Amino acid sequence: MHEKIITITNAPESEIKEKGSRFFGKAFPVFSKEEAESILIGLRKEFYDATHVCYAYKLLQDDIKYSDDGEPSGTAGIRLLNSINHFELSYILVVSIRYYGGTKLGVGTLGKTYYQSGVETLKQAYISEKELYQKLKIQYEFEHSSIIHNVMNEFNAIEIRQDYSDKPLIYCSVKKKFIEDFRKKIIDLTNGKTDIKLNNSPIYI
């Protein structure tokens, strides 16, 4: 997984018209194929009367999928993917829902309109750079509380929550690239008396 990505943090929308046809653009941050496909299923149900529901999604550079959904080949899905690439985004789904207006647009105009639908949608997006983090569970001795918190501050760890039972327990997220240094420093400073476990898969924050 990449250490950094550029994606969106909201679900922007747009609407454009071309010779009577209406194109409703939508975009969503997505982090798996399953999430993208689930959103598409929902949109097809919501816009069951639409003429075409075209889309493109991109996770990593070589993990992409797009569909013309019955439009002439090369006029819709790839154009929406081009709009994603225009903003250099990843982990994103862009959809353009067309209601036919009675006048054929022609291949050239159709391709430009789908591209415009994607671009106009993404112009409304909140674009953000995210970094790869790993969640950790740290169980330690009370006497090492200040060490744990000092190291967390040093590595800019994000605290999620704390629990107290026989020993204090803290859940936090640390940038993936710093995980080994973070773990080693805590183990060294606490003489190996701290239990550190990775929790779940890496996430982007």
Image: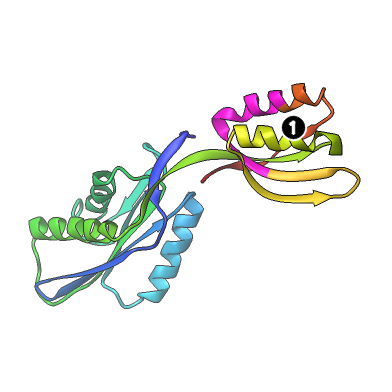
Q: Determine the residue positioned at 88% across, 49% down.
A: 165
Q: How is the image coloured?
A: rainbow
The secondary structure making up most of the magenta span is helix
Where are the magenta residues, as a range? 172-185
Q: Is residue 68 above or below residue 18?
A: above
Q: Which residue is mark 1?
A: 147
| Residue 68 picture quarter | bottom left
Q: Determine the residue positioned at 38% across, 63% down.
A: 11
Q: Determine the residue positioned at 61% across, 41% down.
A: 201
Could you say where residue 140 lies in the image, as x and y percent from the top left? 82, 36
Q: Magenta includes 178?
A: yes
Is residue 24 something that shows in the picture? no
Amino acid type for the residue under numbered disc 1: Ile
Q: On the rendered structure, is 99 left or right of 11?
A: left
In front here: 137 or 21?
A: 137
Q: On the rendered structure, is 194 left or right of 4?
A: right
Q: On the rendered structure, is 7 left or right of 21?
A: right
Is residue 74 something that shows in the picture? yes
| Residue 62 picture quarter | top left
Instruction: Tell me the SS state at disc 1.
Output: helix
Q: Is residue 197 above or below residue 54?
A: above
Q: On the rendered structure, is 32 left or right of 49?
A: right
In front here: 55 or 144?
A: 144
Could you say where residue 8 lies in the image, as x and y percent from the top left? 38, 53
Q: Magenta includes 163?
A: no
